[in-house]
Amino acid sequence: MRSTTNTIGLLPSRHDVIQVADPRAEALRTRDALMTVVERVLTKGTYILGEEVEAFEQEWAQYLGVVACVGVANGTDALALALSAVGVSAGDEVITVSHTAVATVAAIEYLGACPVFLDIDPQTRCVDPRLIRSVLSPRTKAIVPVHIYGQPAPMDEILAVADGHGLKVVEDCAQAHGAAINGRKVGTFGHAAAFSFYPTKNLGALGDGGAIVTDDPSIAETLRALRQYGWKRRYISQTQGRNSRLDELQAAVLRFKLPFLEERNQRRRTIAQSYQAALVGTGLQPPVSVRDTLHAMHLFVVESRAREALEAHLRSAGIASARHYPMPVHLQPAYAGRLRGSDQLPITEALYQRILTIPCHPDLEDGHIDRIASALRLWQEPSSRNGGRHIDPNREKHP
Ligand SMILES: Cc1ncc(COP(=O)(O)O)c(C=O)c1O
């Protein structure tokens, strides 16, 4: 049912709300090919750690330019196992950010290790490398930089401090498949890197999936044991491991999708560019373009002083939006008041109240992109001079 009108025309029906992520669109568009993939796995009869996983591990390692890849059950496990494989254990401190998915911090605590928070750089929204030295202690063992939203963290600066203090670096690449710094893909900088293949990620499975990549064959060997009960030989555990395996079906789906990743990332960036153009003069802060980096544009996140009004404005144009994340980890009930660094995060605390994710996935139709760009163009941020109050965006801005 079409109801009221707004400044950019008729309101779309409830069924036509543009979603922040839409994995179903890709799944349905490629349904026949995916069915062939399922059929292939079905008839092979190996459903866990078989040819598909092995082939995907090789293909993903080759795509990134690393020596080895180990498929696991999800991105959180990938982080925890990677940290364990580089030598992090209970009581060690691991430096990371609070401006991330809670999984980053949960993975550190799985090991009994202690997350220590650092603030972010407002440009990259990733860890501010200038702050690392300020939180080092004799217990510091590793750093987990998060390439948040698909923006690469400043790896050269991070590695310079880490190398100088003998720290391990595990990159959280869950949002950054295909992102790069000076042409070198993220995931290739640290001692190890963790990826998630959750369905809405830039490379997403049809269920959970994850992987760790590394250039160190001994880390890869440790990981292959850790993901399966610590086995070196079937049924014989050399170390204490767990069960975190990538299954054949997910690996086969990922193999099918991988050849399209570059093209789909490029489409994300093209969509982002049209939003950037639409935002000129609105006062909304778009993602900053950071020199020498290639953004994977997993999420297009703007900053607004009037976020609730912006959400309502988009909603009235049939556009969903989201907050990634509604609360930084250090303020969430499970973590509040107990993690070192939590009291020194002014940039993180200012940012989370302003961020809003605008739909920017490669399955958006051209008409959807136009609708979003039009809605953005009509927005006007309240100026600081009017006390941060919202000005009616429905007035015609560009007569
Ligand atoms: C930054 C970040 N790290 C880790 C993860 C964990 O991945 P998964 O959901 O596959 O466990 C995610 C996924 O949401 C993420 O966005």
Image: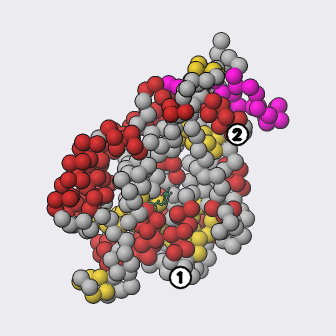
Callout 2–callout 1 Cβ contact below 8 Å: no
- Residue in the image at 29% along x and 52% along y: 253
- Residue in the image at 26% along x and 47% along y: 34
- Using residue 145 as the reference point, say whether residue 235 is left or right of it: left
Q: Is residue 7 magenta?
A: no
Q: Secondary structure at mark 1?
A: loop
Give the quadrant of the N terminus.
top right
- Residue in the image at 20% along x and 53% along y: 39
86 w.r.t. 285: above or below: below
Q: Farthest left residue?
A: 44
Task: Name the kind of residue labelled 2 in the image.
Answer: Glu
Q: Farthest top residue?
A: 399
- Asked if the beta carbon under badge 1 is closer than 8 A to the nearest atom of ligand 1, the reply is no
Q: Can you give x and y, in whole percent of width and height, for residue 210 in the image?
A: 38, 62
Q: Can you give x and y, in whole percent of width and height, for residue 69 in the image?
A: 31, 64
The part of the image, by quadrant, that contains residue 43 is bottom left
> Disc 1 marks which residue?
90
Mark 1 closeness class: few <14, some 14–19, many ≥20 residues within 10 Å? few
> Disc 2 marks which residue?
308
Q: Can you give x and y, in whole percent of width and height, for residue 7 in the image?
A: 64, 20
- Using residue 292 as the reference point, say whether residue 326 is left or right of it: right
Give the quadrant of the C terminus.
top right
Q: Is residue 276 visible?
A: no
Indicate which disc, 2 or 1, sits on the residue closer to the N terminus: 1
- Using residue 20 as the reference point, say whether residue 236 is left or right of it: left
Task: Name the kind of residue labelled 1 in the image.
Answer: Ala
- Magenta segment: 369-394
The part of the image, by quadrant, that contains residue 77 is bottom left
- Residue in the image at 57% along x and 24% along y: 2
Q: Can you give x and y, in whole percent of width and height, for residue 195 in the image?
A: 41, 59
Mark 2 closeness class: few <14, some 14–19, many ≥20 residues within 10 Å? few
